Amino acid sequence: MEQQNPKITVRDCRAWYGPQQVLKEVNLDVYPQEILAIIGPSGCGKSTFLRCLNRLNDLHRTFRLQGRVLIDAEDIYRRDINLAALRQNVGMVFQHPNPFPMSIFDNVAFGVRESSDAKNLGKILLAQIVEQALRRANLWDEVKDKLHTSGLLLSGGQQQRLCIARVLAVKPAVVLLDEPCASLDPASTAHIEELLQDLRRHYTIIIVTHNLGQARRISDRIAFFLNGRLIEHGVTASLLVKPRCQETEDYLNGNFG
Ligand SMILES: Nc1ncnc2c1ncn2[C@@H]1O[C@H](COP(=O)(O)OP(=O)(O)OP(=O)(O)O)[C@@H](O)[C@H]1O
Ligand SMILES: [Mg+2]
């Protein structure tokens, strides 16, 4: 994997909310077609790190970042970056499914309609994009006969797959997921894990999870954060079985967090 060019390169990344430093000298490369799991105790900076990768932290007035984040070797913090295009390319799925209060179809079409070249899209092409995204999110068979009912009427697990379809519809290269299964039952969680395995072939995926079993089942590599530092990262099986750092071992043994 590491012979390929990284999709994402993070160098000496430091971040603050006001006076509080929450990320400290983070260096990490993430490769195409891998699933990287981010683990670590609550408050260690996992979500903040994820949001650095599509500049969602910029929405917080007191947020400040130093260092470099490159996607396809391009600095995403340069002044003239197109933020809407960045956030399409680096899609995000959150802890609680958050469908918009509109139909299943409109949820998936939403980002496509917002995008700059949507004006030239005919109805048929839009319907094809929606179908393809729902198929990719393993939801099509369950919703194909009720595309015009509200997304809010779906089960929690279906809603989360709808949110994944909404992200996929705008053709991202990177998909970030922040504890996407935290509010789901075991069957829905298994469904999402299976889906992520299918998606790995097409995307670079980073998932934050508190569930070490989930990290073991689905990730190629794991990054362990503690107090804003990236303590270590490595191939999933090696890191879980034989971590290099004492802090990682303590976390894996449930000694904190
Ligand atoms: N918008 C914000 N304004 C100020 N401080 C924030 C903000 N968001 C996060 N923080 C602080 O930054 C630190 C890192 O938070 P972050 O949400 O990244 O942690 P996390 O590892 O995702 O935790 P959890 O596992 O609980 O989701 C915490 O101390 C948190 O209080
Ligand atoms: Mg978090």
Image: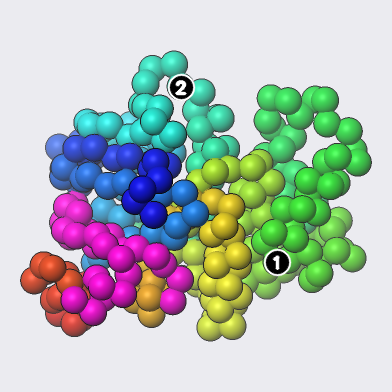
- Residue at image position (43%, 64%) is 179
Q: Which residues are magenta?
A: 217-242
Q: Nearer the viewer, residue 257 or 82?
A: 82
Q: Is residue 205 left or right of residue 172?
A: left
Whether residue 207 is situated above or below residue 66 in the rendered picture: below
Residue at 73% across / 66% down in the picture? 139
Identify the disc placed on residue 236.
none
Q: What is the x, y in percent for residue 152?
A: 70, 62
Q: Amino acid at mark 1?
A: Asn
**Disc 2 target residue:** 81
Q: Is residue 26 left or right of residue 31?
A: left
Could you say whether the residue bearing mark 1 is in a helix, strand or loop?
Answer: loop
Q: Of residues 247 and 236, which is closer to you in this image? A: 236
- Which residue is identified by label 1? 138
- Residue 176 x/y as whole percent: 47, 52
Q: Is residue 96 visible?
A: no
Q: Is residue 38 visible?
A: yes
Image quadrant containing the N terminus: bottom left
Marks 2 and 1, Cα distance to the nearest angstrom? 33 Å
Q: Residue at x 23, y 79 (%)?
A: 241
Q: Earlier in the sequence, mark 2 or mark 1?
A: 2
Colour scheme shown = rainbow
Magenta-drawn stretch contains 229: yes
User: Does residue 78 belong to the magenta stretch?
Assistant: no
Pinpoint residue 23: horizontal percent, then vertical percent.
20, 45
130 with respect to 223 (left or right): right
Horizontal and vertical percent position of residue 240: 26, 75
Q: Is residue 15 above or below residue 42?
A: above
- Mark 1 is surrounded, within 10 Å at the Cα level, by few (under 14), some (14 to 19) or many (20 or more) other residues, namely many
- In-front residue for pair 140/43: 140
Note whether 9 is above or below 32 in the view shown. above
Q: Amino acid at mark 2?
A: Ile
